Image (tube, rainbow, N blue to C red):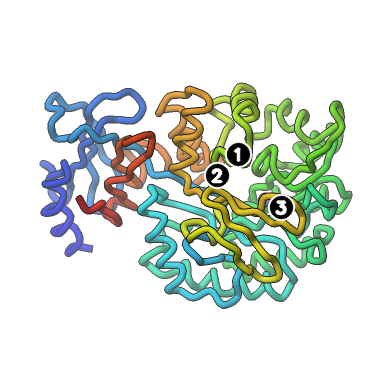
Amino acid sequence: MKNYFITAVLSLIIGGCSAGPDEGAYLIHGIRYSDGVPVSVSVNEGGIITRVEPIRDNTTTHGLYISPGLIDLQINGYKGVDFTDTTLTLEDMITVTRALWETGVTQYLPTVITSSDEILQACFSRLSKYIEDPRIARSIPGFHLEGPYISPVQGFRGAHLEKYIRPANWDEFRNYQALSGNKILLVTVAPEFEENITFIQKAAVAGILVSLGHHNAGPEVVHRAVEAGARLSTHLGNGCANEINRHHNPLWPQLSNDSLSISIIADGYHLTRDEVRTFYSVKGDEKTILVSDALDLAGLPPGEYIRGERKILLTPHVAKYPAEDVLAGAASPMKRCVMQMMQYTGCSLKSVVHMASRNPGRLMGLGTGELLPGRRADLIIFEFVDEEMVIRETYVAGEQVYKKSD
Ligand SMILES: [Zn+2]
């Protein structure tokens, strides 16, 4: 740790940062994302923000923004690494985490999707060991289990394999939770089955955040699920059939229920501009969360790929599952969704950082996602170039984990 700080201070003097007045502290300068004020952020040796102070001299920011790092609650994989793969290695996890740091993501929940009992057991057994590695531990607070307790109906199940979809089973889940080291923090379920409502109650009592997704629940069931403890809707507007009843469908009650936050894939392909604007108008800065839902194929060249038992078509911007005529996941990192969200809605940088960092951090109780004294120094330095968010530096718990070479 000591060695790092010496390196950091030396290299950071160039990047707009320098050793601070306090012993063991150093400073990171940037234009604060929330109000455009140039600030100096003091970080102590423990990786905690101790001060955020306005500065007069703007030159040390180099015109770059500073904000909390992005937090991705739903990501299936990246750069060829699939989290629902029983051959996953620690090296894979390190590779993918480093690749995500380059995109400004400082914390993420590897998302494991609907699979057989054997595969899910194998995945969580491996993942729980890997995330203890100190090189990546701080960026992976836990896991998201999406399925297998979702709707088996075509359209609603999306690209999840029907044969592995099953009714919620608390004992089965508890086994996964034990294998994960109690690190399944978020679970996506469909609420329209009686046993799934019971499951939601038990999960909520156990402190697991329950999200509704890949379901065809009408108003009564959605509101019951919220009473049972559900707090989030998974990628609202996706995992939904193309044709639904105009009055009684899953969208309206999830939008109208103020106890539900929503996650959305604002990559420019999963939702239309009008959907994004409407959802955001309803849920606002407090209850909208951006997720990438990136597939392992994200970051790879377009083409046809075999993934498990599925043939996936990767276009330059999105992955499709032609067998079911549905999208199979996204191919864009969070920072792309940040740009698209601002373009679609005209929201401020402050608002979009809330949606991509503060809100997921708060909902999951991570203690990150805010540029405030006492918070862990998970920070990004960035600029916008040709309508792209360019990450220049990424810090996790005060440690510089990425710096863009000029
Ligand atoms: Zn999904």
How far separated are the C-alphas under marks 1 and 2?
A: 6 Å
- In the rendered image, the quadrant that contains the N terminus is bottom left
Kindly tell me whether residue 394 is visible in this rendering. yes
Q: Is residue 231 left or right of residue 367?
A: right
Identity of the amino acid at label 2? Val
Label 3 to label 1, Cα distance in Å?
23 Å
Give, as a three-letter code, the residue at label 3. Ala
Contact check, label 3 and label 2, Cβ < 8 Å: no
For the point 63% across and 26% down, the residue is 274
| Residue 243 image point, x, y percent | 83, 37
For the residue marked with disc 1, what is the amino acid? Ile
Query: On the picture, is 204 further left or further right than 150?
Result: left
Q: Which residue is mark 3?
A: 203
Q: Residue at x 14, y 24 (%)?
A: 56
Image position of 363 with respect to 56: above or below: below
Where residue 33 sits, quadrant-wise, is: top left
Q: Are marks 3 and 1 in contact (CB under 8 Å)?
A: no
- CB of mark 1 within 8 Å of CB of mark 2? yes
Going 14% across and 53% down the picture, which residue do you hit?
A: 11
Front-most of residues 373 and 32? 32
Q: CA distance from mark 3 to mark 2?
A: 22 Å
Decide which of tag 1 and tag 2 comes sooner along the chain.
Answer: 1
Where is mark 2, residue-wise? Answer: 291
The residue depicted at 74 percent of the width and 72 percent of the height is 117
Mark 1 neighbour class, 10 Å CA radius: few under 14, some 14 to 19, many 20 or more: many
Give the x, y percent position of residue 102. 35, 53
Please give the label number shown on residue 164. Answer: none
Residue named by callout 1: 264
